[in-house]
């Protein structure tokens, strides 16, 4: 069959790579994709928001399965549209994607269905929000309610910092409609785990865990980003820890969405804090995580497309995983997540790809020259028998890549060592 993947980043490159390895797939298309995917897929110059054109392309190209990568088209109802046209699609409908689209909605579901998470309250009024922060004290977490590309969260260690974050969201209108209200949450202590699952209604197939590195700089310093690297497995947590997260969080959430009349199909991503009281939800995403997908899919021995098709057909599925570790290092534009230049030349990508997987996110090709074209530019993922081996291989491959416009963290996966 022909497969169409929606999106243009590193996550979509990893999905296209995985789909291209499927025995069921004849051809992979990615809309709009990026130049780095050209060796494994055909990129199609259609934007993720152009639903009519995407549907038309799916009919013209005899697409047997659509996989939606990013969150915005999910919240704009792209899955609903494909379903209406009887085109097989993997991803949550608009109503179910609200688990990611509104943090206050997700909190409401968790509180009503007793899914473990931190205490929280939602505010539209700045003065009321400030009064609540002063009452609760710090550390405390301030989040823009809607989608802010991973940048709408402030972990405030002081009351002043929390008030500054409230001003930024509610008064300065930093995130537009996404910041029309804020969710103020209890600060949870522990170590983070990203746990994704393939879901269809009440069927939940957990993937292997990963850990993301959100801060821009070594030692978890600097501003929050969309993610500067990830690794899998996460040896700090036992299988029983993961099983508990599935039983207490992922399964009850899938059940709750069915109960709410918003049955969830697609990838449910739980960003978890592993606290002394057990796993608690920091956030839900309604799709494959980025950069976690780039380290989780290389460990999947099962055929990704076969897994999705069986799940959609409500047939039994077994997931098979490699015992190998994968470490992924993001190379980002200097200045990211704030302002950065585009169009800076990159050398050494072919050399890096000889020993590692190089997933492109924000690159473009001008003749034979690769150039930067985004904030997170690429991710170098390497396998190893152990995390230490995978980490060493990822950094070794990273040294091949030369660009004055790029930087990367030197401590990805250090917590696991």
Image (spheres, rainbow, N blue to C red):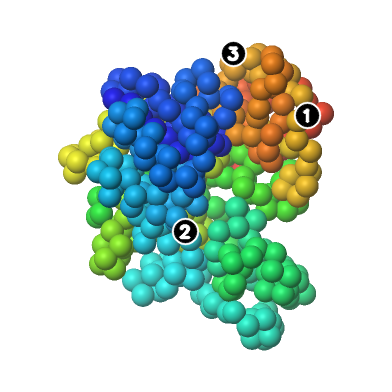
**Circle 1 SS class:** loop
- Distance between mark 1 and mark 2 Cα atoms: 34 Å
Q: Earlier in the sequence, mark 1 or mark 3?
A: 1
Q: Quadrant of residue 127?
A: bottom right
Measured from the top left, where is residue 325 in percent x and y?
A: 50, 30
Q: Nearer the viewer, residue 277 or 62?
A: 62
- Label 2 SS: helix
Residue 65: x, y in percent? 31, 35
Q: Is residue 167 above or below residue 87?
A: below
**Residue where numbered disc 3 is placed:** 354
In the depicted view, which residue is nearer to us: 292 or 226? 226
Above or below residue 230? Residue 254 is below
Residue underneath mark 1: 344
Please determine whether, in this image, residue 340 is positioned above or below residue 99: above
Query: On residue 100, which mark appears?
Result: 2
Where residue 313 sits: x, y (%)? Answer: 19, 41
């Amino acid at each position: 069959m022909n497969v169409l993947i929606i999106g243009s980043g590193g996550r979509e490159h990893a999905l296209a790579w995985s789909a291209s390895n499927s025995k069921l797939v004849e051809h992979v298309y990615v809309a709009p994709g990026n130049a780095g995917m050209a060796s494994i897929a055909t990129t199609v110059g259609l934007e993720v928001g152009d639903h009519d054109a995407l549907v038309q392309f799916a009919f013209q190209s005899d697409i047997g399965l659509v996989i939606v990568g990013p969150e915005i088209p999910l919240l704009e109802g792209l899955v609903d549209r494909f379903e209406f046209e009887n085109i097989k699609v993997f991803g949550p409908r608009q109503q179910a994607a609200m688990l990611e689209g509104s943090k206050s909605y997700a909190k409401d579901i968790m509180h009503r269905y007793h899914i473990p998470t931190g205490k929280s309250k939602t505010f539209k009024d700045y003065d009321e929000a400030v009064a609540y922060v002063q009452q609760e004290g710090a550390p405390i977490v301030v989040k823009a309610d809607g989608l802010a590309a991973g940048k709408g969260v402030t972990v405030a260690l002081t009351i002043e910092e929390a008030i500054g974050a409230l001003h930024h969201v509610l008064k300065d209108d930093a995130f537009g409609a996404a910041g029309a209200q804020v969710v103020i949450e209890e600060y949870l202590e522990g170590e983070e785990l990203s746990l994704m699952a393939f879901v269809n209604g009440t069927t939940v197939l957990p993937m292997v865990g990963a850990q993301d590195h959100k801060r821009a700089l070594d030692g978890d310093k600097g501003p929050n980003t969309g993610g500067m690297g990830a690794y899998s497995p996460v040896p700090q947590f036992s299988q029983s820890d993961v099983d508990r997260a599935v039983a207490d969080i992922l399964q009850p959430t899938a059940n709750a969405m069915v109960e709410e009349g918003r049955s969830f199909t697609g990838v449910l991503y739980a960003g978890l804090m592993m606290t002394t009281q057990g796993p608690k939800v920091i956030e839900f995403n309604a799709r494959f995580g980025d950069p976690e997908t780039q380290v989780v899919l290389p460990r999947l021995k099962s055929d990704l497309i076969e897994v999705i098709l069986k799940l959609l057909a409500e047939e039994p599925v077994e997931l098979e995983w490699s015992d190998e570790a994968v470490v992924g290092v993001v190379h980002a534009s200097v200045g990211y997540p704030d302002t950065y230049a585009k169009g800076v030349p990159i050398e050494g990508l072919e050399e890096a790809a000889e020993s590692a997987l190089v997933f492109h996110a924000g690159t473009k090709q001008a003749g034979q020259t690769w150039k930067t074209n985004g904030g997170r530019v690429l991710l170098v993922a390497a396998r190893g028998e152990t995390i230490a081996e995978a980490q060493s291989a990822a950094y070794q491959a990273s040294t091949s890549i030369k660009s004055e416009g790029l930087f990367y963290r030197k401590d990805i996966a250090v917590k696991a060592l």
